[in-house]
């Protein structure tokens, strides 16, 4: 019989996935029901409170991402929770599967399946409630306050196109892609920190964000000529009316490559760090 | 089977092992004794690949344990003192765990579970600590891993279960397998252990076969004050003084491991000099 690979073996990985699902399915199903329940309560609250534009796109957009980030990061910080104690850590590390297989199992549940299932649950709650909101609007037509503009039916927010959402989301899917980086950071935190991994990773990310903002404000901006600003992928200056009059930008292909790199590279980099950290973890 | 060379390990500034050397051979049940905090569990974790040597090396069947390769993890089973089993039924747990161990033998597992009288239809989290431990011991043996590392295996077992444990382990040892048992409960395992190792101050200070110990030392009770004066170690008891003497006349006696352990920790030089003149 051909010896199984020490790095990755498909059948061993399937065993790992099946074991993880069987041991956690009850907890996961309860958690998903809880997420659905919270979304229903929150959207119902908005429906009752906002008489003019219930379930408008911004509400949906905010709810989707706030829910995704909070529940996702909480879940990711529990994926390697066994490693925070000697008692559970030995059982986890002793299981005859490679560290890569264990990481890929965590990524399947924590990154891919969580995102897919959360999105399905969100729409399962969102679409019917948007319909209810539109029925309310249709049954009692009204204008925006102090205007003659008629309030129209609300569209369902599409997280993949970002249509009707804020500009940066429509153009670069900033929050959508950043979610995978944030989720991967919390996954790394669950291996890296032995206790309070969620809180510690929140602090690390907050300090990191503050650091980037400080560099932007104290280092990059002072280097630019007066009246020039730092954009997402270039520099620009504004005229007296506040419009962009000069622009220093990368060629379009290079700009697209940079955007793609910023969107996709951080999660991959964090997964590699998590893999190495998992290999050198001691309990 | 396992060779440890010049192992150095510390927790921060607290040194645990300093140039520790050890060889484990197949077909032997080793008893690892030592005071609290001398590093018995740490040694098992180093051999199992859960802690990494800071200096020196460990070789187990040609593997470096710290790499935790799946084929190595199949060959070593560590039964920790403290553990947690998932909240699922025993049969479901076996269904998911067994395929990871290519040498796992289900009828063997069922036989051990039967010998331990563990209910097979219960959920693992609803079992008592002792029952969970018996499940893990049965599983460990049924994996047919050549090296079993058992950390305080009799803790939490009742009197009958301890006897069952001894019987099961004695029946499970063969020429391909080695079992290393770390314990404080010397009396529980006295009749089981083939070789005793005592760890102290970061070293293995004593490492001898029980047969060899019996050939060099005589364990007896005596009211004779002259004999007591000649003893390498003595303890007062109702049956007279319990003594450890030099076995100059090759008399038969069964080593009392608890007494031997006390004697070695009290005066390691005298006792070890008898074995390494």
Image (tube, rainbow, N blue to C red):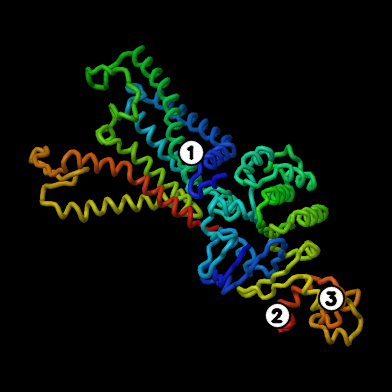
Q: Measure the C-alpha gap from mark 1 to mark 2.
A: 55 Å
**Element type where label 2 sits in the image:** helix
Task: Tell me the residue that label 1 is attached to.
Answer: A109
The local crowd at label 2, few if under 14, some if 14 to 19, many if 20 or more residues have their Cα within 10 Å, is some
User: What chain letter is assigned to the residue under label 1?
Assistant: A
Drawn side of residue A170 relative to residue B76, left or right: left
**Element type where label 3 sits in the image:** strand
Which quarter of the figure has residue B127? Answer: top right
Q: Position of residue A224 (x, y in %)?
A: 14, 52
Task: Tell me the residue that label 3 is attached to.
Answer: B219
Q: Measure the C-alpha gap from mark 1 to mark 3.
A: 61 Å
The local crowd at label 1, few if under 14, some if 14 to 19, many if 20 or more residues have their Cα within 10 Å, is some
Mark 1 vs mark 3: tell me if same chain: no
User: What chain letter is assigned to the residue under label 3?
Assistant: B
Does the image show residue B235? no
Which quarter of the figure has residue B42? Answer: bottom right
Q: Position of residue A111 (x, y in %)?
A: 43, 39
Task: Tell me the residue that label 2 is attached to.
Answer: B268
Q: Is residue B131 above or below residue B55?
A: above
Q: Residue placed at 41% from the left, 43% from the top? A: A183
Question: Dots 1 and 2: beta carbons under 8 Å?
Answer: no
Q: Residue placed at 62% from the left, 54% from the top? A: B75
């Amino acid at each position: 019989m051909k010896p199984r690979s020490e790095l990755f073996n498909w059948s061993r990985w399937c065993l790992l996935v099946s074991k993880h699902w069987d041991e956690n399915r009850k907890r996961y199903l309860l958690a998903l029901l809880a997420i659905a329940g919270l979304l229903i309560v929150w959207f119902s609250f908005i429906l009752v409170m906002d008489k003019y534009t219930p379930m408008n796109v911004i509400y949906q957009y905010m709810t989707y991402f706030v829910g995704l980030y909070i529940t996702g990061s909480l879940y990711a910080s529990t994926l390697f929770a066994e490693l925070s104690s000697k008692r559970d850590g030995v059982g986890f590390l002793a299981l005859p599967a490679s560290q890569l297989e264990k990481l890929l199992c965590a990524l399947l549940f924590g990154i891919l399946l969580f995102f897919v299932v959360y999105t399905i649950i969100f729409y399962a709650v969102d679409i019917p409630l948007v319909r209810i909101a539109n029925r309310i609007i249709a049954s009692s037509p009204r204008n925006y306050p102090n205007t003659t503009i008629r309030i129209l039916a609300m569209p369902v927010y599409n997280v993949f196109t970002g249509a009707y959402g804020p500009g940066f989301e429509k153009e670069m899917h900033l929050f959508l892609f950043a979610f995978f980086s944030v989720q991967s950071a919390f996954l790394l935190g669950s291996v890296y920190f032995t206790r309070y991994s969620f809180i510690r990773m929140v602090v690390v990310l907050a300090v990191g964000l503050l650091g980037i903002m400080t560099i932007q404000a104290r280092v990059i901006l002072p280097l630019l000529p007066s009246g020039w600003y730092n954009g997402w992928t270039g520099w620009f200056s504004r005229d007296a009316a506040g419009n962009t009059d000069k622009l220093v930008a990368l060629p379009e292909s290079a700009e697209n490559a940079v955007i793609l790199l910023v969107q996709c590279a951080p999660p991959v980099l964090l997964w590699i760090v998590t893999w190495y950290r998992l290999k050198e973890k001691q309990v | 089977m396992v060779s440890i060379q010049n192992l150095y390990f510390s927790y921060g500034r607290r040194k645990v092992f300093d140039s520790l050397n050890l060889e484990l051979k197949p077909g032997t049940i080793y008893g690892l004794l030592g005071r609290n905090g001398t590093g018995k569990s740490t040694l098992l974790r180093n051999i199992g690949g859960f802690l990494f040597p800071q200096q020196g090396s460990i070789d187990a069947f040609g593997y470096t344990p710290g790499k935790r390769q799946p084929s190595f993890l199949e060959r070593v089973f560590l039964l920790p003192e403290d553990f947690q089993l998932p909240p699922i039924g025993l049969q479901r747990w076996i269904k998911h765990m067994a395929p990871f161990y290519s040498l796992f033998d289900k009828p063997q597992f069922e036989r051990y579970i039967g010998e331990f009288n563990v209910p097979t239809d219960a959920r693992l989290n609803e079992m008592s600590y002792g029952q969970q431990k018996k499940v893990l011991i049965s599983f460990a043996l049924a994996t047919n891993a050549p090296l079993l590392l058992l950390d305080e295996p009799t803790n939490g077992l009742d009197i009958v279960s301890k006897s069952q444990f001894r019987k099961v382990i004695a029946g499970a040892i063969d020429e391909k397998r080695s079992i290393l048992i770390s314990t404080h409960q010397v009396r529980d395992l006295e009749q089981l252990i083939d070789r005793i190792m005592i760890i102290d101050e970061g070293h293995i200070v004593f490492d001898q076969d029980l047969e060899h110990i019996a050939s060099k030392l005589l364990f007896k009770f005596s009211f004779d004050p002259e004999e007591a004066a000649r003893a390498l170690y003595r303890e007062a008891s109702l049956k007279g003084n319990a003594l450890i003497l030099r076995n100059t006349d090759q008399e038969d006696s069964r080593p009392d491991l608890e007494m031997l352990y006390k004697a070695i920790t009290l005066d390691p030089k005298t006792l070890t000099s008898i074995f390494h003149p």
